[in-house]
Image (spheres, rainbow, N blue to C red):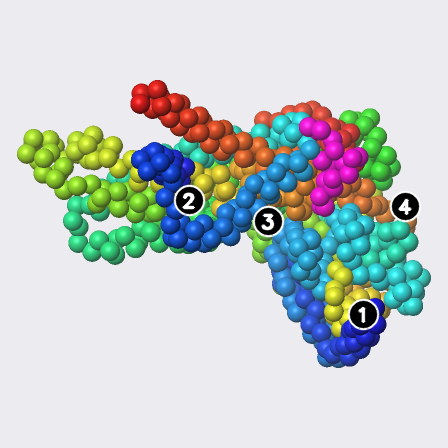
Amino acid sequence: MAQLATAKEDDAAKAAGRASGRKPFRLSTLMSIVGTTPMILTAVGVFVICILYSFVLSFTNSRIFPAFGAENFVGTDQYARLWSTGRWLVSVNNIWFFGLLSIAANMTAGYLLAVFMDQRIRAEDLFRSIFLYPFAMSLVITGLVWRWILDPNYGIQATVRGLGFEDFRFAPLVSADTAIYGLVVAGIWNGVGVTMAIMLAGLRGVDSEIWKAAKIDGIPTWRTYLFIVLPMMRGAILTAFILQCVGVVRVFDLIVAMTQGGPGIATQMPAVFVIQHITDRSNVGLGMAAATMMLLPVVVLLGLQVFVQWRANQAKGKAS
Amino acid sequence: MKKFTVVAAMATALLGSTAVNAADVEVIHWWTSGGEQAAVSVFAREFDALGEDKWVDTAIAGGENARSATLQRTLGGDPPGAAQFNISRQFEELAEAGLLLDLTPLAEEEGWKDFIRPAAILDVCEFEGKIYCVPVNIHSWQWAWASVPAFEKAGVPLPKNLDEFIAEAPKLQEAGVIPFAIGGEAWQIGGAMGVVMLSQLGKTGHEAIYKDRNLEVAGGPEVLNAIKIFKSLKTFTDEGSANRTWNDTTNLVIQDQAALQIMGDWARGEFAVAGEKPGVDYACIAGPSEEAYLDTGGDIFLFPKQEDAAVEAAQLKMASMMVNPQVQALFNNAKGSLPVRDDVDMSLADDCMKVGLDILKDPNRVIQGAGIYLTQDSIGQMDDLWAEAWANPDMTAEEIQQRFVDIIASAE
């Protein structure tokens, strides 16, 4: 997102530069440079240096302490062990499964809720607060509450059985095959409200003239929502999507509170694996190898984006 | 140069003057259940009674979480005053890195080496000839806790070993009792599996695997048998076991809803708090086998180095208080564990504790837990394996055993 903006600014600056023959330099430019320097330094220090540090650590046999001695470098041993560890493979599968399911459900339900809120309903503020409330809750609390709701001994199952349905079974968390669905449910409950809020802002941002035009053309409301308004909200959709992705990659507290990675290792996630290995299991090397692997998809996506932009710029350059 | 000496003199004067001040000592531990709370408050009370220093209690639920917090804070330069760990290799790197307060002078002055029994638990605290921690109690994992009324209800005699229990379990099920109670946390499953394993292997087999890394024994028939027992125990659990804490699970036995739980002797504290009587309301079965072995696990406290001399003085006071015979008796009675010294008045010990004390008198019956021989990393791998095997009935016993052998082969 930010890169898109800067690229546009660069183009603008280039155009300005071409027009005047040299770059205009004002005091405000200097001020903005001075103002942003600390932030830039922090970003470089925290992100770039720390990521490199973690990356280098993943080639060592560090236990609790970072060890950079010549004898500590073990090449790609940690990666070999990582990819032969059943628990890591399960974690990787889970994050895809959990991610795809919860993001798809959140985006769909979020948009439908936003459309519902867009119908000029009464007490809109109240509803918005209710839907947004789960997002304000700590994931630990969310996880704990959902764990109780899904517990066979005192949750939904026990309640329904208490009403006389003796054979009613609803306890996803007790079995290794279904526990991940329980997590998805809690993930949706947590994420759908904020998606709705962003989508609603996007909907409200669509020009009312469009609606009028659609009405005049006699297009049904649902088609307007789906084929005209939706493509016009690209920014809001992308924002909601990225927010969801970040949440999925980092998912940790929900797991710890709801299932602790169980039953067995059925609901382990990469973030839990990393944290557990760099703390209690005192194997920083392996933890960092796992963290590097988590970073990989992000790097690939960024690389793709840069490449696409570069191609676009090239094409522009040829055209002009 | 002159200036420097003046500054140094002033600094020492300042330090000297703070040494008489009282200090707050923050203690991180994971004793959060009823019986554990009763025990840890003995320490807090006794420490506060010593003088001006204050025990600041930081209880963090879950051993793994508490240990992580201690490690992270110590590495980050904000160490707690004292922290609980298990008798194991969990903290060896902190000692190697020189982050812990050296207790050797105190230990020599008080003669810890002469009274701490068994000697092996003090060895855990020793690195390069220096002592860095205080053992406070001895716990053994190898116990089964049975609800007497539950077995009576099913008309089944109390089992002497696991094979008997598995043979009788269907009858317990018919009587509407949960035959085997366990919480689905990885450490509970791993611990129970360790007990099952030892009941099949005995001392020689146990040491062959964990101490000598003998892969033939690890791939042998005893281990296979243990895995089969473990798999059949799974079929006698209840639905709610996923995520249940150990003390909630013990509570099922206390309320006679469940027949048997394999859990270390800290469970005794829960029975005591609930007012249950050994032999009448509940039974403790050592082993659970006719030839019971007990490991000498337990808890230690270590004291991360502090910059404040007053805190350091308070830390030494706390270490000394923890091994005081009077405090040992009070603390261990509340905790359900055995004291780390044999000159303690154990007239308060109940029947279960007496059984344990008798077994511990025979050195051939005492073993070191796997945590003494293996790093936390390997222990964690095993916990993962047992958790996975527990939850996944499709894994064959042979498959599980092969993975166990691989872990032992790669252990450092």
Q: Chain of mark 1?
A: B
Q: Position of residue B366 (x, y in %)?
A: 86, 48
> In the image, what residue occupies the spot 49% across and 50% down?
A37
For mark 3, what is the residue? Answer: B258
How many callouts does the rendering have?
A: 4
Please state if B132 lies on the left or on the right of B35 as rendered.
Answer: right
Question: Distance between the Cα atoms at labels 3 and 2?
Answer: 31 Å
SS type, badge 1: helix
Amino acid found under the numbered disc labelled 1: Phe
Residue shown at the point (39%, 46%) measured from the top left: A25
Q: Quadrant of residue B309?
A: bottom right
Task: Name the kind of residue labelled 2 in the image.
Answer: Ala
Residue matched to label 4: B364
Q: Secondary structure at mark 2?
A: helix
Seen from the viewer's position, the closer of residues A172 and B166 is: A172
Q: Of circles 2 and 1, which is in front?
A: 1
The numbered dot on residue B4 is 1
Q: Chain of mark 4?
A: B
Alpha carbon distance from label 3 to label 4: 33 Å
Instruction: Please determine if labels 3 and 2 lie on a single subunit.
Output: no
